[in-house]
Image (spheres, helix red, strand yellow):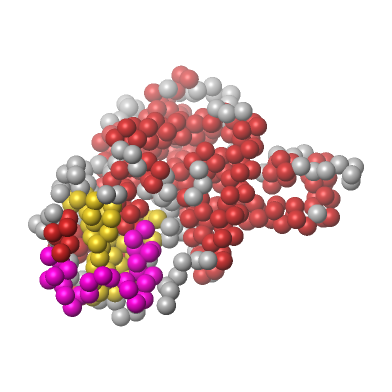
Amino acid sequence: MSTHDKIDEMTLHAYVDGELDPDAIAEVEAWLATHPQDQAMVADWQRQAEQLRQMFGSVAREELPREWIAALDEKVPPPWRRWARQAAAALVLVAGGAAAGYSVAPRTSAPTPDAQLVASRAAGAYLVYTAEVRHPVEVGADQQAHLVGWLSKRLGHPLSAPDFTAIGYNLIGGRLLAEEDKPAALFMYENDAGDRVTLYAARNPEGTETAFHMVNTSGTRSFYWLDGPLKFAITGELDQDDLSRIAQAAYEQLTT
Amino acid sequence: MSDRQMKEALVREAPVLRRFARSLVGDPALADDLVQDTFERALTRLHLYDARRALRPWLFRILRNLRISRFRQAARNGPHLELVEGETPAPSGSGSPDQGLALRDISRALDMLPDEQREVLVLVALEGMKYHQVTEILDIPIGTVMSRLSRARKRLSEILDLSGRGRIRRVK
């Protein structure tokens, strides 16, 4: 083994990724033993890989949708599109946790990437504004009528602030947001433990309707749906069941 | 390989395809749609599969290309493509709270990687694909695989380093 040969970065990647033969592995390990900076870098990459495997590992352990198995068991090519929709519907039920008690009817297929944007924006607003202790909202719940009237006017469509007191969440207030060059509204709620959830609302220019969808973004969780003239997202850091209960209450109160 | 054999193989590969799809696309419904489209295409293009070669990279390639073409379609309908790219699942593993935070950080960090770096990193580090397999899946030379991998890891380290120091929490 030649200790004077410099081990380059590509060889270190190959080492981490199991691409080297035993001789080369020995050479790299001897190098790392005397080069702490490279050693730290390698350890860093190994930790990244481990975290990725932890983060997505559970996905591979989820039970497969029964429709998939059924489709793959059949002799004739199945009508996949239809199954895709059913799978999306099934997901809605799974996302709801207690499937039996779930009354929200999914109405169309999986959302377009564009529809998903509402969840990204809602998650962004959630992260920025719920972190505020002193100024989480522009207009407080003590002026609820004014707040709702103001935001309705800015959105150009009647809004309401749903009531979640039955689930333990009280309205703190709301604020006006910008979605690109259009106004959007944010209502914020809080429970006694200080957990906050937000309802994001904006115009839906396409006028489309979608099912209820759940997405996890940057550590937050959102349920979102498009409902004709408006689109909504409920966002929080709660577990799926708790958040879905709030989202369902919102859906029921907002959809007439 | 017969149609029946492929269907059996697809049932076996489905969990891994799901994981791969989820690491590329945040929304579980969209990810599962991609997997189903991959099934469909694998069956209709069965005659193109060389049974002497490993199946998984072939399926990964189909899934990844389907995703690209779908996002191209979406791009024609609206300008907001890059934001959708920024969604990945939150940590789902159990563990200590510290571990949960670390996973949340890596989830955010992955969101911040350019797409071409993200897919190389995920194929190598999460799915354990060999470099030569990645060149085939993505149709790029080995040098490009290596440079993207290198940049992805560097970028991820930088982001994680930053987020470790300045994590967003409730501010007084």
**Magenta stretch, overall SS:** helix
Query: Is A133 one of the magenta-colored residues?
Result: yes
Q: Residue at x 12, y 55 (%)?
A: A157
Residue situated in front as seen by the camera: B75 or A61: B75
Q: Residue at x 34, y 67 (%)?
A: A129
Relative horizontal placement of residue A255, taking residue A18 as reference (left or right): left
Residue situated in front as seen by the camera: A21 or A251: A251
Relative horizontal placement of residue B138, taking residue B88 as reference (left or right): right
Q: Is residue A205 visible?
A: yes
Relative image position of residue B164 (x, y in whole percent): 56, 64
Q: Residue at x 35, y 42 (%)?
A: B80
Query: Is B23 one of the magenta-colored residues?
Result: no
Say if B41 sits above or below A220 in the image. Answer: above
Look at the image and tell me in which quarter the N terminus of chain A lies: top right
Q: Is residue A167 visible?
A: no
Q: How many marks?
A: 0
Q: Residue at x 25, y 42 (%)?
A: A109
Say if A161 sits above or below A77 in the image. Answer: below
Residue situated in front as seen by the camera: A213 or B86: B86
Bounds of the magenta segment: A124-149
